[in-house]
Image (tube, rainbow, N blue to C red):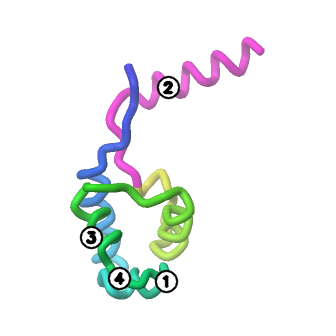
């Protein structure tokens, strides 16, 4: 089974994290240094995902981890087992 990041659920998760930390879209726009908020609205709607660089910034601003921002579909335990097995067989 493959895993994938669910962009719609990740967007909903980001929206919740913004609210729980007292941030508006404009606040995040300012922190991120964006000229306009369109990218953030795309994240929240699930039309796109933040880049890795932006995820690092968001994790710091929202006092959480990248893993807690992203919503993953699929069998993560299987992926961990597969990765660990490959590592042991090297």
Percent from the top left, x then y, of residue 22?
A: 33, 84
Viewed as shown, does residue 47 lie left or right of 27? left
State yes or no: residue 72 in magenta: yes
Mark 2 highlights which residue? 79
Q: Nearer the viewer, mark 2 or mark 4?
A: 4
> Which residue is located at x 31 percent, y 54 percent?
10
Tally of marks: 4
Above or below residue 8? Residue 38 is below
Can you identify the residue that label 1 sits on? 33
Indicate the secondary structure of the residue bearing disc 1.
Answer: loop
Per the image, the residue denoted by label 4 is 36
State the quadrant of the C terminus: top right
Q: Which residue occupies 73% across, 12% down?
A: 89
Name the outermost residue toward the top: 89
Distance (Cα) linking label 3 and label 4: 10 Å
Quadrant where the image shows the N terminus: top left
**Which residue range is magenta in the image?**
70-90
Q: CA distance from mark 2 to mark 1?
A: 35 Å
């Amino acid at each position: 089974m493959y895993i994938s990041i669910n962009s719609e659920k990740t967007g909903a998760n980001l929206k919740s994290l913004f609210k729980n930390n007292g941030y508006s879209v404009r606040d995040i726009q300012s922190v991120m240094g964006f000229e306009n908020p369109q990218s953030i609205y795309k994240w929240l709607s699930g039309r796109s995902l933040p880049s890795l660089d932006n995820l690092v910034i968001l994790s710091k601003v929202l006092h959480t981890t990248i893993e807690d921002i992203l919503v993953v579909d699929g069998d993560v335990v299987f992926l961990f087992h597969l990765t660990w097995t490959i590592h042991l067989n090297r």
